[in-house]
Every structure is written in C-alpha cells, then in structure tokens.
Image (spheres, rainbow, N blue to C red):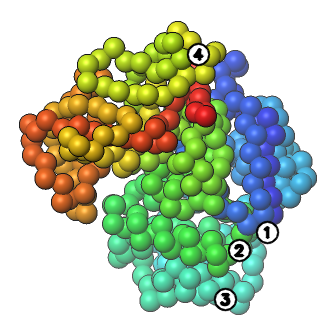
Amino acid sequence: MISIALENVSKSYQADTPVVKNVDLDIEPGEFVVIVGPSGCGKSTMMRMIAGLERISSGTLRIGGKVANDIPPQHRDIAMVFQNYALYPHLTVAENIGFSLEMRGVSKTERLRRVEVVAHLLQLSDYLHKKPKDLSGGQRQRVAMGRAIARDAKTYLMDEPLSNLDAELRSSMRAEIKHLHRQLKATMIYVTHDQVEALTLADRIAVMNKGVLLQFDTPEKIYDDPASLFVAGFIGSPPMNFIEANCKEGIVQTTKEGTRIPITCPPELEGEDVVVGLRPENGVLSAGDKRMAIEFRGEVMLIETTGSNRNIHAKTATGPLLIVAPRSAAIGLGDNVSIGYNTEDAFLFEKKTGKRIHLS
Ligand SMILES: Nc1ncnc2c1ncn2[C@@H]1O[C@H](COP(=O)(O)OP(=O)(O)O)[C@@H](O)[C@H]1O
Ligand SMILES: [Mg+2]
C-alpha cells in the first residue's frame, strides 16, 4: 500500500486559466478517497495528473513519498478505470481482462491465473468465454473494472466508473467496489459528481468546486461539520435549506413575519448578510403547544412520498422550506404548519464569502 500526496498542485491548460488551483491532498496508504464535485470542477484533471496522463503545471506530486511529477505513467504502478470505458468487442471477457497483462508481456500461465482471480472477485467466472455484446451493462462495467484491476497495481484510480449505469445497478456496484477495495488492500481514488456515492464509499471525501479543494474529511465530518456554504449544500439529500438573514444587534434577524431565528452573531459580523442552513431531516412539524427555538410558519405546497418518509415543501415568509417528516405525520396540502428547529441544528455562513461561522 502506498501514499499519494499533492502539494500545492495547479493545472492550467491555457495560460492564466487554472482549472485546478493550489490543491493539497494527503492520501494515506490503503485509503479509499472519493473526489466529489460538480461537472467541470477539475476532478478528471486531478486523476489524469496523478496517473501521469497530464502534466502538472506547478506543485509537487509524491507517490510513496517520492516526487513523481516526471515519472512516466507506465512506471507509476497505477491502474485507472475511465468514465467511458470501451471493451474490445471481438475479444472474450477473459481476453479483455487479460489484455493489459498481455501488453506487459506477462506469461500466459500467470495471465490465466490473474484473469481467474479477478473474474472470481467480480463474479464473472461464468462469462469468461462470452463477448461483450452478450453481456448486460453491469457485467460490461465489471469487465472494464476487471481489466484495470488485473494488473495488481498499488493504486487504483476510478473516474466515474458507474455513471453509465442505472440506479439499481449503481447501488449494487457500489457495494462491490467497497468489497473490492478490502480485497485488493490498495490505495483507491474514486471520482464522482454524486454525493451519495461519495458518502457511501469513502474513507475520506475531497469536495471540490471550480478547481479548489474545499474540504477533505470523513463522510460524517463533512456532513456534520461542513466548512462552507458550498459543501453544506452539496453534501446531504435532500439538500440543506438556506435562509437569508442579517446580523443586527448581535443576533440573526429576518425582517419576515412569523419567523424566529434566535441565533447569536459574532461581533465581527454586525451589519453583515448571513445565510442560515437547516437540514430537512432535522425539522420538526410542530403543533401549537410544542414550541422550538427556531420557528417558521408556512403553508404546505407539495408532499412527496419517499417510502419511509415524506418530503414536505412549505412556503414560508423567508422562502421555500423543505423538511423530511415521518409518514405518520397528519399533514395535507394547503395546511398551515409550524416548522421548528433546535438552535444546535442551525448552521451559519457569511453570505459574502460562503465561509462557515461556528456558533458558540
Ligand atoms: N484537454 C483540455 N484542454 C482544455 N481544457 C480542458 C481540457 N480538459 C479539461 N478541460 C477543462 O478543465 C476544466 C475541468 O475539467 P475536468 O477535469 O474534466 O472536470 P470534471 O472531471 O470535474 O468534470 C473544465 O473547464 C474543462 O473544460
Ligand atoms: Mg470528469
């Protein structure tokens, strides 16, 4: 198992327009790190720099502690699964999996052995003699993965390997990839734009936006303690509610009727615009007698059933508010409701910078 470290790494394809900006990322040997962020934020560029397929404009990449900026890709001991995999249609599953080994001059006996091990790991043993056209989408994706892991590399990079699959298959493949990581005992870096995938797979998540690494931490920490407005809104489903407010006389104030947000503002934010963040799953639909510290009055505009719960969309004086309510809650369209939160559930952000303000 091997460590991968980026130190102040930047990348510009064109002069003066960096698409990856001063990224520091310290990945432990054997760790499963997920890089997540919206499309175009620089995820694939990061992977391609680590793999050696793209030059690093400035900064240092270390693999196993050694500076690797100029090591050619074939000497980095890294295997990569790409977003748009292409299998060789005229080759069988076994030949596809063994292809990179053959290119590397691995003996036929060893090749067959590796292919068998990998096929077993990916539950492809019964399909070794089939051609790609006779496989399902999920099986084909497993073959593509098998081709990468057949190499027995120290590090595996996976760039949105599940993005072409339907939802059900993605979820079962997620479990397989997690299992695979335990079996391979290798360092794994996985790229996705899907925050659910990031939360379920990662030992640690690196959240990126516009080429900047915003936060690098465990899934729990990212969810419980987001460092910025962007991270707070990106991680969690349904997404966090944001309410615009202002710091006046030391407390958060909205000018809207029927809203109470008794949160203290730090003195340096006096007069500044702020954003209050509240997770839908922490909201409580309260009856008249059950008053909570933070309160919104609103009207139910939409109810979505998610199976175990219901998503209640309310219209309040401060804007739309979404809360997750138990199925048993007796709520109907058009009802006037009161939505309550504990002050401990509130997140506060500076509007101008998006920076998280820790509440004391
Ligand atoms: N070969 C390239 N030449 C010029 N610009 C590129 C190239 N590859 C990517 N980009 C640009 O760099 C940015 C980051 O792209 P990419 O790393 O592919 O993002 P992601 O994988 O997060 O969607 C985008 O604005 C993209 O248009
Ligand atoms: Mg990409």
Q: Which residue is mark 1?
A: 1
- Nearest the eye: 236 or 159: 236
The amino acid type of the residue labelled 4 equals: Leu
Tell me the SS state at disc 2: loop
Q: Is mark 1 within 8 Å of ligand 2?
A: no
Residue labelled with disc 2? 185
**3D distance between C-alphas at marks 4 and 2:** 48 Å
CA gap, disc 1 to disc 4?
Answer: 47 Å
Q: Residue at x 56, y 82 (%)?
A: 121
For residue 215, which quarter of the picture?
A: top right
In the image shown, does 289 or 195 lie closer to the viewer? 289
Closer to viewer: mark 4 or mark 3: 4
Question: Considering only order in the chain, which callout, 3 or 2, is on the residue closer to the N terminus?
Answer: 3
On screen, residue 34 above or below 109 = above
Q: Which mark is residue 207?
A: none
Can you identify the residue that label 3 sits on? 113
Q: Looking at the picture, which amino acid does disc 3 mark? A: Arg
Q: Residue furthest right?
A: 66
Q: Position of residue 84 (x, y in %)?
A: 48, 54
Q: Quadrant of the C terminus?
A: top right
User: In front of the other: label 4 or label 2?
Assistant: 4
Is 24 or 255 nearer to us in this picture? 255
Q: Which residue is mark 4?
A: 269
